Image: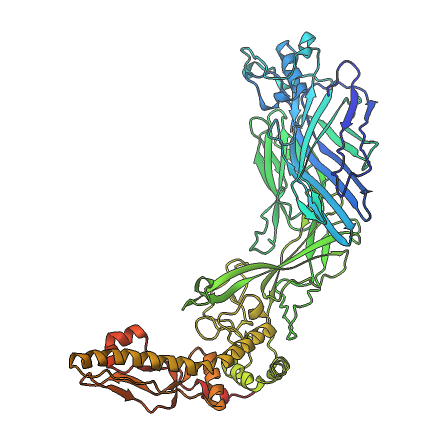
Amino acid sequence: MRALGLVALLCVTVVTPTPAAIAGPVAAVATTTTTTTTIGSVTRAAPVTLSGSISYGFAYSVAGNCPGCRTSESLSVIMAVAGGAISGRATSPGPDWDNPDVYHCVLASRTGSKCFWVPLTVETASVRYHFATQVAQNGCRTDASATGSYKAASTPSPLGLDIVFNPGPTGGAVSTPPGLVPVGAFSLSSLPPAESYRATGDVAIQLAMTYTNRARAIACGIKLPTNLWDIPIGFAGRYRAGETTTSGATNYQGLGAPRLSWHLQVKETGLEITSPIAGATIALTDGHYFSPQPGPDQSAPTSRQLTVKGVDTSLGATVVHIGSASARVTPDGAWALRVPVIAPGPKTLTADDNVGATADEHLRLIDLVIDPPAEGAVLPITAAPAMPDLGAVATVQGFPGSSSAITFNWSLTTRGEYRDRCGHNPNALCGQWYPYDDEVASGATTGSTPWEGDFSAIEGGFGRLSASADIPGVLDEPVQSEPRWVDITGTNPSAAEVEAYVSAQDPANASVEDEIFCHESGFTQFRPSPEPREPATTTVPHDIAPNPGPLRPLYGAMFAGIGIAQKDPASFPTEQWDWHANVNAGIAVYQEDLAAAPEWRQTEQGRLSGQLTAVLEVVNRARAHRKLKAAKMAPAKVPPLTPAQLKREAIRLYNGENEYHFNLQYVVSANHLMVKTVGTGKWAEGAGEWQGMAAWQAAGGPLVARKWIPAQDPGYVTLVTACHS
């Protein structure tokens, strides 16, 4: 759109899209209207700067053509903008020339007009789009929702905003279609000085936005399609003589009641603060304006600096001051400096330069903080076990309005190191530490209602608690909170609690399992003091101490024995932070070992048979050489283990070895003509394992007895059966 002639018009056009069809066509259609208003005119003797805000939004909810079907959509756009004037005379096509009004301005400059324009910089753009559908049909129910994303235009500026000042007519050139302009030998050096520019105050703004919803869902036979919306918005106008701002709002007919509003401030060039915009409310956690900001592994800083930008075209201006901070003025009049900020609340920025020019700006600073819990608070997992009640409360410090209706969205992540077998391979003969960083809870509260935590798992470690909220009038929503670091520790149950739980889970074997858990860990799930073999967690603030912390899952024996049952490997986080799950895993292992203990007899029987076959092969080869009759022999029958032996064998299997071996072997006699037996032919107690086949063959195979290699802890079973709470 373009404002031409002596009387400018303010024109706004908004195209509102129709909703996506969900569960059948939705019976509603959006309409487009155009509103025209006459404002007035003014002449200014110098280039100007503009700053302010533009917003647009709509929302609706309609019923579909099936029972229980509803579709709703909403869109909200808030932009803070600022810019300074640029001459329309240039030596080559620029990125702004795809705007017809800028094109018009360039053509006007070729005929001698002092046309110039302001390509606005979008300092912040808060865009929210939400789509939702509900379907309840034929007993099937589903809720699908999607949040759209803003896609910035590549030219001429992040949102394609230009304000054009055109002081004179351009003749027939106005009918030339937009496109690359054939420019003659114009030079920037030939531009007249800034103070000679004269503008009528004609303003034309072109705005184009693209919102993309790429969510897909199929449920109840209903498919949520991909939406791509292009929303063009434009308006133009003049200022009344002496006015420094223009504001307005236009309501439209149609679905969602679209509304466009604007508030722009016009200033003569001189000393001016252009960023942040005057009257803005800004959060201390807004990285567009404040630094430093805490990283994902840092605490909140004790102080920050506010970046303030502006222009100063005052004659002779070289330095701008705000308090103790100062900055040089660049040749094009720009300056930027950082002002220390400690606390939220109202703040006045007073700038002055070396030639006596001054500028004031009023801001409001807020800070979203979490308290309680306090920084570094210890929040133990209960012995039940259950995650702790967080009791977290969010407060908006410095915010003058009520926070009773503000929705706070919460997140809690835990971080640390856990032990597992190498490569997460349960058969690997080594263990190592692995870092973790998991979200264990998320949820929402309103106002001062405490958030206790909506937990998805029992998992402790160093916790990072954060909140976010859409706060009315604050730039760059949603506002992020300062991080709150806590320590989520384990709590050891008593021995009596463990024994009672084991008895309830496996009453038939509870007495033996109690003895195993007593010996393995002393009924301890969490180590009271920090584990010296555990590496420090690197994804937490450097001043957290101790690191690693106490009351983490007990790491006992190699390779990765964890907790009361010393389960190796133990699944993370369940069997490491939930002592019930750890004990259940230990019970399951013992039950498997108890079932496997009788099978040791068949294994030993197979060993004897195989050994005898190998020995007979050697013996009969020697006998055949001497023309002797082949020897025949049946292997001895291995008797079953007694109930007492089976119990001890199962206990030893829990530790990964056998408690008994059948003490009988077959070897080749010295003359190679007979089968020789070695051993008592009875079960022998003494934990260990048979020599490996390769080692036995290397030592002589059938010519020698296979070795029984004793275990490193031969008294394990005795120690287990002697352990009691």
Decide if residue 61 is on the left or right side of residue 101: right
Q: Position of residue 660 (x, y in %)?
A: 40, 86
Q: Examine the image and state in which quarter residue 20 appears.
A: top right
In the shown orientation, is residue 139 left or right of residue 572? right
Given residues 284 and 568, the one toward you in this image is 568
The outermost residue toward the left is 626
**Residue 444, can we see it?**
yes
Using the rendered view, name the quadrant where residue 489 is placed: bottom right
Residue 196 seen in render? no
Give how far across and how far down residue 693 sits, in percent: 31, 74
Relative side of 345 to 546, left or right = right
Quadrant location, the N terminus: top right
Q: Nearer the viewer, residue 707 or 350?
A: 707
Which one is in front, 666 or 580?
A: 666
User: Nearest the camera: 53 or 2?
Assistant: 2
**Residue at left offset 34%, top offset 85%:** 635
Relative to 176, is 271 above or below? below
Q: For the C terminus, which image quadrant?
A: bottom right
Residue 370 position, x and y percent, is 68, 58
| Residue at position x 73%, y 17% in the image | 200
Q: Residue at x 51, y 71 (%)?
A: 530
